[in-house]
Amino acid sequence: MKEANIVKHNGKDNAIVKAIILLVFIIVAILIIKYTPLLSYLTPEKLGSFMDAAGVWAPIFYVALYAAGVCVFLPGTLLTGLGAAIFGPYWGFLYVWIGAMIGACGAFFIGRTLGREFAASLIGDKLKKYDDAIGRNGFATVLYLRLVYFPFTPMNFGMGLTKVKFWDYFFGTGLGIIVGTFIFTFFIGTLKDVWASGNWDELISFKVFFSIGLFAFSFFIPKIIKKIKGG
């Protein structure tokens, strides 16, 4: 009995230590973004020059940057916009999606490894039923939250604290971010192509109007999804 209590006490202490490490990691990441010149290097000009120098390795470097950026709270819209501006609407979409998925999985595992034990110890009877429900309906829950544009990075870490199964999280995220990612990269990439060509007559084209229409439609997606779910 005494040994069981010691093991339980040590387990609780380990959970607290891991939770503190997670909290410190998040705070340090936010401080780095806020108080260092890191963001000043993330411009289409500077990053584009680096990618040009990287040659065939540019997509790999960009995907790695996106994935790491997601884990350290770099703004997802910034990283996505850079990908679209540098690689164009189609390749930009592919690299953004891959980088976002790797980053989302990385942040999930950080949250799961460092925070799940502590979070589980805090869950009372009332919260446990919600945690159990997420575990049972993980794919649908993740998909819904992605489609209504729940903040990307906080959700990555937060889902790691819940009972959701990794593959439910993976497929829910992968499917849920496709539409928004494509719309945003297609819009930015299309405008970038027109700007780069210098042919302003292309602003009056089906492709440009289509990209603008998609971008405008994206703002209504959360309301449509909520209406479908509610009705």
Image: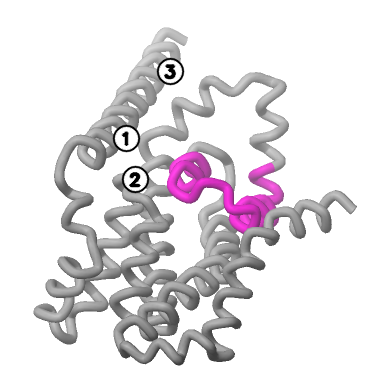
Q: Residues within 10 Å of mark 2 (few under 14, many from 20)?
A: some
Q: CA distance from mark 1 to mark 3?
A: 27 Å
Q: Is residue 6 above or below residue 190?
A: above
Rendered location of residue 95, percent (x, y)? 36, 75
Q: Nearer the viewer, residue 13 or 169?
A: 169
Q: Is residue 82 above or below residue 153?
A: below
Q: Is residue 143 magenta?
A: yes
Residue type at mark 3 is: Lys
Asked if one can make out residue 98 in the rendered structure from this viewpoint, the answer is: yes
Q: CA distance from mark 3 to mark 2?
A: 34 Å
Q: Residue at x 64, y 53 (%)?
A: 148
- Which numbered dot is residue 73? 2
Identify the residue under disc 3: 8
Asked if one can make out residue 138 in the rendered structure from this viewpoint, the answer is: no
Q: Residue at x 34, y 81 (%)?
A: 195
Identify the residue under disc 1: 26
Q: Residue at x 76, y 59 (%)?
A: 224
Determine which quarter of the picture holds residue 5: top left
| Contact between labelled residues 1 and 2, with CB atoms less than 8 Å apart | yes
The part of the chain drawn in magenta is 134-160
- N-term mark: 1 or 3: 3
Q: Nearer the viewer, residue 173 or 74?
A: 74
Q: Nearer the viewer, mark 1 or mark 3?
A: 1
- Which numbered dot is residue 200? none
From the image, give the main secondary structure of the stretch colored magenta: helix
